[in-house]
Amino acid sequence: CEFGYKAPENLLKDRIILVTGASDGIGRAAAKSYAAHGATVILVGRTIKKLEEVYDEIEEAGGAQPAIFPLNFETATYKDYGEMAELLQKEFGRIDGVLHNASILGSLTPVEAYNPQMWEQVMQVNFNSALLMTQSLLSLMYESEDASLIFTSSSVGRKGRAFWGAYGVSKFATEGLMETLADELENISGIRVNSLNPGATRTGMRQLAYPGENPATLRTPEEIMGTYLYLMGPDSKGVNGQKYDAQPPKVDAEA
Ligand code: NDP
């Protein structure tokens, strides 16, 4: 199964793969893991200094020279995504994979009291930005022989949970966009579209959501890369419109 998927070293050789939120947490681990498996990675995110660190780490590990594309998803417009696509067209001519990963938590608040401005901000960063970016990048993905589009979900984007507000709703919207695109692209392009729920993972966002939790009890981003590699590489060819989990469901200790 994909949880224990062991990727061949050259799984992503010569592939051009874009990762959003590549500066930290799971996106950072995914960018480095894709590069370690042969990909040329386009690092997209807002904090340039952190993106440069990831760039250096990839180069030091002997990976192909990455590209950095700074974008703040809170403020980026349709035009900005278009300009990014134009640059990538000139530089690479195609894109073989996109991992939509960047997100913010917003606040954990009952819907009734949720600040509307924050709601908008969360929808913008977590959902609208991925929509606009996908619109601008699809033509570059048509140029690929085997393109994979991965949207990052969450368990609260598959079953609603109290107080998760805009974050949960943004993930439901993401799942809806994934299914709609998968259905539209099935049979007319080689692009597969799937969603991936990382599950509880040791990152800054998780710590923010569960401040009382001991992070040492959680898997690290590096430990959950199997499904990220599986869905990005050729072994998932033909898999389309599916909702994946990067970790096995928790076994009930009492059971
Ligand atoms: P982190 O907070 O560690 O990383 C989030 C990434 O998104 C950072 O690179 C951050 O950039 C980037 N980002 C945030 N806001 C913006 C913005 N306005 N413009 C551009 N980039 C932005 O989160 P995780 O690694 O934990 O989460 C990754 C994904 O996994 C998310 O989609 C999250 O919803 C999902 N997820 C995570 C779980 C977990 O347990 N960790 C569980 C379920 C789902 P910067 O470095 O500048 O802050």
Image (cartoon, rainbow, N blue to C red):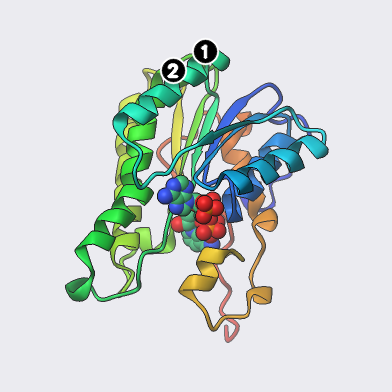
Q: Label 1: how many residues lie within 10 Å, few (<14), some (14-19) or many (20+)?
A: few
Q: Are marks 1 and 2 in contact (CB under 8 Å)?
A: yes
Say left or right for 190 vs 177.
right
Q: Mark 2 points at which residue?
A: 86
SS assignment at label 2: helix
- The C terminus, quarter of image: bottom right
Q: Is residue 83 shown above or below 119?
A: above
Q: Label 2: how many residues lie within 10 Å, few (<14), some (14-19) or many (20+)?
A: some
> Disc 2 residue type?
Glu
Residue at 35% x, 47% y: name it. 74
Q: Position of residue 160 (x, y in %)?
A: 30, 66
Q: Name the residue under label 1.
A: 90
Give the Cα separation between the discs numbered 1 and 2.
6 Å
Residue 243, can we see it? no
SS assignment at label 1: helix
Q: Is residue 129 shown above or below 139?
A: below
Residue at 42% x, 58% y: name it. 104
Q: Where is residue 102 in the image (x, y as percent from the top left)?
A: 47, 49
Residue 120 position by quadrant:
bottom left
Q: Where is residue 116 in the image (x, y as percent from the top left)?
A: 20, 63
